[in-house]
Image (cartoon, grey):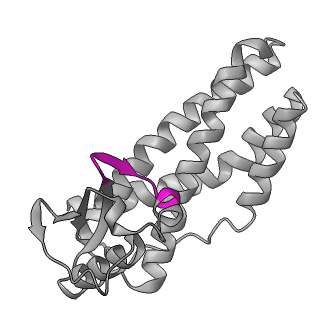
Amino acid sequence: MRLFLDETEMALDLSCCCTFGTVIEEVTRRASAAGRIVHGVGVDGKDISLDEEREMSDCPVEKIGLINIRTTTSEELLKEAIDGAVYLSEALRHDIRTVVAFIREDDASDSKALVVSCIESLGTFFQLTGAVFNGVRAGAFTLPESASGKSLKLPEPPAEISAILHRLLDAWKAQGWPRIASILENEITPHIEEWAAFFSAMRSRKAQ
């Protein structure tokens, strides 16, 4: 196995790091000691997700040809999350308005693919909000201050969002179009609006 960290090859004691999971743990520890955060992992030329990382945890390193790990700083990670969340919130609000309009015009057939896209994007958006919320609470991310010295107020975590998304999925499976429109407009949109305003304010203050 060959291991690269930020495009630089590094050596590990394979007697201690004999599985993929232990390699990731050791590199994460070293990155953290240098003030950096593991931001992406590639295996044999393919980027893998966090779920795939967990599934591969017990895989012996002898079965892996190449591991490529990328790191970033908390500041860079937060900027990326903010930019992604602002863009995604705008796209989601547009798509939700379109879906609701189609449904109210009794043209639900044209909204089917868009509803699927919305559900997938909603999952990504609220993963971002959760990561930022947890990062701020843990001290990894710092909220910027205004010129008057006031810090932004972190929105409350959308604790019920998981239940809302489950209700949306149930309505989708049942093809309950009026219910889908109601959940998107009355339950999902307020959360998006609150977090979108927060992320936009963060980006504006950081640009000052």
Left or right placement of residue 171 versus residue 81 in this view: right
Residue 112: image quadrant is top right
User: Does the stretch in magenta take in 48?
Assistant: yes
In the picture provided, is 164 more to the left or to the right than 88? Answer: right
| Residue toward you, 34 or 177 | 34
Q: Quadrant of residue 174?
A: top right
Tell me where residue 122 appears, x and y as whole percent.
Answer: 60, 45
- Of the pair 84 and 5, the residue shown nearer to us: 5
Question: Residue 142: x, y in percent?
Answer: 34, 78
Q: Is residue 109 above or below residue 80?
A: above
Residue 179 in the image: above or below residue 189: above
Q: Residue furthest left?
A: 8
Relative side of 189 to 56, left or right = right
Q: What residue appears at the point 31 percent right and 78 percent down from the top-left corner?
A: 28
Residue at 80% x, 13% y is: 105
Camera-nearest residue between 187 and 33:
33
Above or below: residue 42 compared with residue 159: above
Residue range in magenta is 43-52
Residue 106 placed where, x, y %?
84, 13
Asked if residue 95 lies in the magenta stretch, the reply is: no
The N terminus lies in quadrant: bottom left
Q: Give me the residue at 20% from left, 62% from top.
A: 208
Count the numbered circles shown: 0
Q: Is residue 142 visible?
A: no
User: Where is residue 150, by image quadrant?
Assistant: bottom left
Residue at image point 34% right, 68% down: 61
Residue 160 in the image: x percent, y percent? Answer: 75, 64
